[in-house]
Amino acid sequence: MDIKRIATLVVVLAFGFVAGVWLGDEETGRPDEEERSVYRCAMHPTVISERPGSCPVCGMDLVKDRGKEQKEKPGVEDREILYWRAPMDPKFTSDRPGKSPMGMDLVPVYEDKAIGEGGGVKIDPGTIQNIGVKTAVVERKALSRTIRTIGRVDYNETSMTDVNTKVMGWVEKLFVDYTGRAVKMGEPLLELYSPELVAAQEEYLTALDYSRKLRERAESDVAAGDLDLLKSAKQRLLYWDITEGQIAELEKTRQVKRTMTVYSPQEGVVVHKDVFDGAHIKSGQHLYRIADLARVWVYADVYEYELPWVKVGQPAEVELSYEPGKTFYGEVTYTYPFLESKTRTVKVRMVFPNPEIKLKPGMYANVRIKPLVSRDALVVPSQALIRSGERNVVIVDLGEGRFMPREVRIGVQAEGVYEVLDGLREGEAIVTSAQFLIDSESNLNAALKTMTSESNGDGEEATPSEHKH
């Protein structure tokens, strides 16, 4: 009995030993399979190897494929993507997926990875408070640019009229006898004696009398021809600027007027006068120039680099030195198609309402043209931008004392802000005031190092990304 028990025990122990060895081999084999790594070429993803080496196509070192680890790592999908960058050129960044200049897919840079690899720093709250870090939020707004220049007030050329006569004669009486006088439309300017005009009136009265006599005789054929003669005589008076009212009065009174009255064709101010009492004038001779000052022109010189922002219809403002604080509002009406070679400027014309005649031709004025650059631009404050030669950098506040420099592409500067074309997203926080915001690589690096938290990571100071001049 004892021998059987001993034999059974030996068999059980032997079986257990063999099973343990077999299971141990299987357990030790599984990690080998799980730890098996795959290496790929960054330029040729189809090149795959189970061990490190070089790409047979381009010769680049193969990199470890961590795609499986990233998929199995919990919480990867929940990480926030800060921006996208080119795998071969970290300087090229974008706020959305796309292609790099080399045609490769952009890779995401996550918030937690950016601190370690992107040159970010972690700052303790005490240091943040001591250096006075201030932040602002990247936002969208309508962006307009202000162009400041000097303007000159001038007459509105479309509201000016020259006064002359179509007959020769002599000035009998001058009603408007000085330059600068305001006149109303239809106001008499002068009386002119003209032998030609007297003869034309007599001819018209003769034709009128003859026409009436023929009508009384009921000779229709002769009356029709005489009617044409009457119309011709009347038309001659009209051609010589005799009004319908004056002709009607001539028909009523049957008296030839020795002089003709010249009336103002518009309301305005006499800006030029070239006639005097008793003067002999010829047909077509210039007598007066009348300008309406209710709307005036303002000319301004705009530099050629500012010309792309100036468009017809844009709002404009002027201020006068003799009346500070008062602003006049108008608009751009014309941009002249030539450049002044000496000043490198282009003349721009604006029109301004002038009901109180405050804007007087010949005055100089401070001009502001406000073109609308964009109705919905992504902008950052000007003080947030570090401009350093080849690059433009902002410091992004990642929260919890973490900061990271990021290169951005900027557009127009206006109203204390810069337009951001690439590199930032709406709602991100950026630093606007701190000791490290200076336009010098050495000063920037030194400031970031002094702000590094003593308890950051393994005790090594983080280094900001390359900052070229």
Image (cartoon, rainbow, N blue to C red):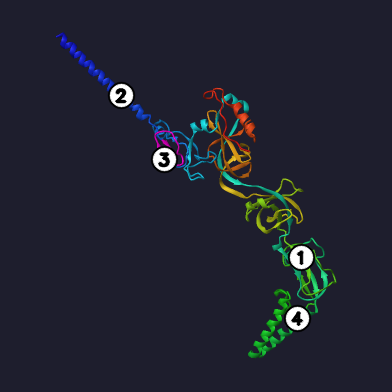
The numbered mark, 2 or 4, whose residue comes first in the sequence reads 2
Q: CA distance from mark 4 to mark 1?
A: 28 Å
Determine the secondary structure under disc 3.
loop
Q: Main secondary structure of the magenta part?
A: loop
Q: Which residue is mark 4?
A: 200
- Closer to the chain start, of discs 4 and 1, is 4
Which marked residue is nearer to the observer: mark 1 or mark 2? 2
Q: CA distance from mark 1 to mark 2?
A: 113 Å
Q: Which residue is mark 3?
A: 47
The image quarter containing residue 161 is: bottom right
- The residue identified by callout 2 is 25
Q: Give the residue at mark 1.
A: 289
Task: Judge by depth and name the residue closer to the eye, 270 or 220.
Answer: 270
Q: In the shown orientation, is residue 266 left or right of residue 427?
A: right
**Residue 399 location (% of width, % of height):** 53, 30
Rounded to the nearest whole Å, what is the CA distance between mark 2 and mark 4?
A: 134 Å
Q: Position of residue 128 (x, y in %)?
A: 59, 27
Q: Is the residue marked by circle 1 packed among few (<14), some (14-19), or many (20+) residues within 10 Å?
A: some
Q: Nearer the viewer, mark 3 or mark 1?
A: 3
